Image (spheres, rainbow, N blue to C red):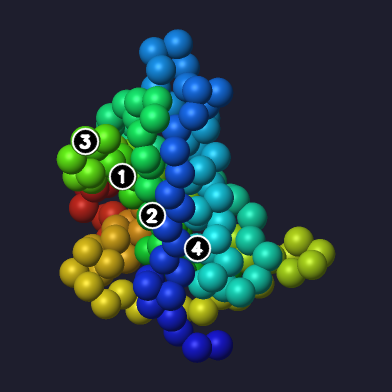
């Protein structure tokens, strides 16, 4: 299985915020944004693994900026780290200013997907090789998040998680 880079999975979805997708304040519903992010992350995971993928978890979501009705929203997703059968997907959400066209970061999220075969059994995915400084930072942070998740689930002792050892001393 040949290793891949984050750019191999990069997915960009751009869409307009319509009235039926907004709350009483005329901002995009959080659930609508979550669905858009899930679709983009799913495509990124599929591009990396070339397999059926399922959402395993939504690890982090930050709703930092409201996205108003009529806005152009761009969701960018890419695999930030691949493990045995799971992949962490980092998602950036951008909103475009209506008049200037300038983009600003509105939100971000981290999802985990698992590659499965036709029976739903997890299968191995290619290794990920980061190329840029940001990709390397996200790659390293993904390992720490995975270790913390395993510690919190009781599947890994804090002393076994070398990257997290200092947090538990």
Point out which mark residue 44 bears: 4
Q: CA distance from mark 1 to mark 2?
A: 8 Å
Q: Please tell me the numbered disc located at residue 94.
A: 1
Side (left or right) of 163 relative to 60: left
Q: Identify the residue under disc 2.
A: 76
* Contact check, label 1 and label 3, Cβ < 8 Å: no
Residue furthest to the bottom in view is: 2
Q: Is residue 153 visible?
A: no
Can residue 73 be seen in the rendering of this structure? yes
Residues at marks 4 and 2, CA–CA distance in whole angstroms: 9 Å
**Sequence-first disc among 1 and 2:** 2
Q: Are marks 1 and 2 in contact (CB under 8 Å)?
A: yes
Q: Nearer the viewer, residue 159 or 31?
A: 31
Instruction: Give whichever of discs 3 and 2 has the lower sequence position.
Output: 2
Q: Residue furthest front?
A: 99
What is the x, y in percent for residue 51? Answer: 65, 71
10 Å crowding of disc 4: few (<14), some (14-19), many (20+): many
49 and 92: which is toward the camera:
92
Residue 163 screen position, x and y as percent? 28, 61
The residue labelled by disc 3 is: 99
Q: Are marks 4 and 2 in contact (CB under 8 Å)?
A: no
């Amino acid at each position: 299985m040949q290793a891949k880079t984050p750019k191999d999975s990069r997915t960009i979805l751009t869409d307009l915020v319509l009235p039926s997708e907004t709350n009483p304040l005329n901002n995009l519903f959080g659930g609508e944004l979550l669905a858009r992010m899930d679709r983009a992350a799913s495509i990124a995971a599929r591009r990396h693994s070339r397999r059926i993928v399922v959402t395993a978890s939504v690890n982090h979501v930050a709703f930092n900026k409201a996205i108003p009705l009529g806005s152009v929203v761009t969701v960018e997703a890419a695999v930030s780290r691949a493990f045995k059968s799971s992949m962490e997907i980092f998602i950036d959400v951008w909103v475009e200013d209506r008049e200037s066209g300038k983009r600003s970061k509105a939100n971000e999220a981290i999802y985990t997907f698992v590659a499965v075969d036709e029976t739903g059994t997890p299968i191995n995915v290619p290794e990920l090789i980061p190329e840029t400084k940001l990709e390397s930072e996200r790659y390293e942070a993904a390992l720490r998040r995975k270790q913390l998740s395993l510690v919190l689930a009781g599947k890994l002792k804090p002393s076994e998680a070398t990257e997290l050892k200092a947090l538990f001393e």
